[in-house]
Image (tube, rainbow, N blue to C red):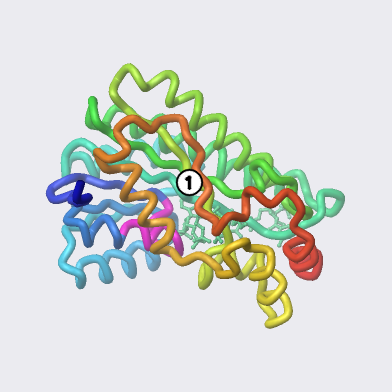
Amino acid sequence: MRMDIDFQGRHVFVFGGTTGINFGIAQAFARCGARVSVASRKRENVDAALAVLAAQGAQTHGVCADVRDFDAVGAAFEDAAQRFGPIDALVSGAAGNFLCPANAMSANGFRTVVDIDLVGSFNVLRQAYAHLRRPGASLINITAPQATVAMRSQAHAAAAKAGIDQLTRVLALEWGADGIRVNAISPGPIDGTEGFRRLIARTEEELALAREAVPLRRFGTPDDIANLALFLASPYASYISGAVIPCDGGGAIDSVKPALERASAQQA
Ligand code: HXC
Ligand code: NAP
């Protein structure tokens, strides 16, 4: 069988899709012919993303919205659906993070990350529901390895991403009858991204330690994650729902990560 992934004329919405991994996903869908909507908080990020996508010849639409604002998220989907019609694929990837030991973290610091990552994901999926193509829509949450493997200085993000994993499964259960699939991607360390700079490594020594912690001995790229997103949104994944899929060079299968532990301890 020849695999041919084509999103010509399909509407793909990437929330938090203006930078990093999520922007890589938006670009990949655009390359496959999709009409791509992106949203995030900062006007400069939205404008920059739209300029790149338009230069690639994509039909694009951009909105400024904070995932913590339920009404603003709803308005963003309303706007995009009016422009490009029902949503065929939705990627929910907005996130915030910083390294901080739990005993130094303020209540507001914990709440802020949970609000963006977990409550924000609920807001995005809940508000998208009315605008999804059904049957057929594919929803993809972006989670992280710390959802299942404890990581120091990550109490807020680990709790939030674990919540995203379960939200993925519950919505797959509830919305399956509508013909809506809900899955999540758990990226490993993706080179050149904000998350990588903040959490994984900055110095040469940290880079070497972090690379050693990946069974495949290389960092991921945004395209590695985008390829999985394209697959999950395509008909080739039409029987996959409720799955949380690592895309991490094998990192998730290694229960002992001394090198990564040392790297994150140096960062904290
Ligand atoms: C301790 C911190 C802190 C830090 C912020 N806070 N940064 N505490 N150490 N480095 C605290 C603040 O003091 C404040 O608490 C509270 O958090 C809210 O901070 P604000 O700056 O007011 O929040 P806000 O403007 O909403 O910004 C949210 C943010 C910011 C998360 C703090 O960094 C952001 O917008 N990040 C988006 C980009 C990002 O993080 N990308 C990486 C995603 S990577 P007090 O008590 O003082 O009021 C990722 C996972 C990667 O998600 C996984 C790799 C394995
Ligand atoms: P990033 O570039 O900082 O991406 C985060 C995106 O979310 C940005 O476009 C940001 O744009 C947007 N955003 C942040 N807060 C928002 C809010 N409150 N409302 C709306 N949009 C918001 O980081 P990244 O490293 O590429 O991470 C992307 C995703 O991959 C995240 O879900 C992260 O947890 C996950 N992940 C990353 C790695 C990694 O190695 N990088 C590993 C595992 C998982 P604005 O600032 O304009 O809002």
Foreground: 226 or 4?
Answer: 4
Residue drawn at 64 percent across, 48 percent down: 253
Name the residue rendered at 79%, 51% in the picture: 105
Please state the extent of the stretch shown in magenta in the rendering: 16-26
Furthest toward the bottom, the residue is 204
Q: Amino acid under label 1?
A: Ile
The answer to whether mark 1 is within 8 Å of ligand 2 is no
Which residue is the extreme one toward the front? 1
Residue 5 is left or right of residue 126, and the answer is: left
- The residue indicated by pointer 1 is 185
Relative to 23, say whether 175 is above or below.
above
Look at the image and tell me in which quarter the C terminus lies: bottom right
Q: At 48% across and 46% down in the image, what residue appears?
A: 185
Q: Which element is circle 1 on?
A: strand
Q: Position of residue 36 (x, y in %)?
A: 24, 53
Location of residue 110 in the rendering, given as x and y in whole percent from the top left corner: 71, 45
Direction right: furthest residue: 103
Where on the picture, by quarter, is residue 203? bottom right
Nearer to me, 51 or 10: 10
Identify the residue at image location x=38%, y=61%. Answer: 23
Does residue 236 appear left or right of residue 141 in this picture?
Answer: left
Q: Give left or right: position of 201 versus 230.
A: right
Q: Is residue 111 magenta?
A: no
Residue 82 screen position, x and y as percent: 17, 40
Q: Position of residue 263 (x, y in %)?
A: 75, 68
| Label 1 CA crowd tier, 10 Å (few <14, some 14–19, many 20+) | many
Q: Which of the 4 image quarters holds residue 90?
A: top left
23 is within the stretch colored magenta: yes
Apparent side of residue 60 relative to residue 204 in the rendered image (left or right): left
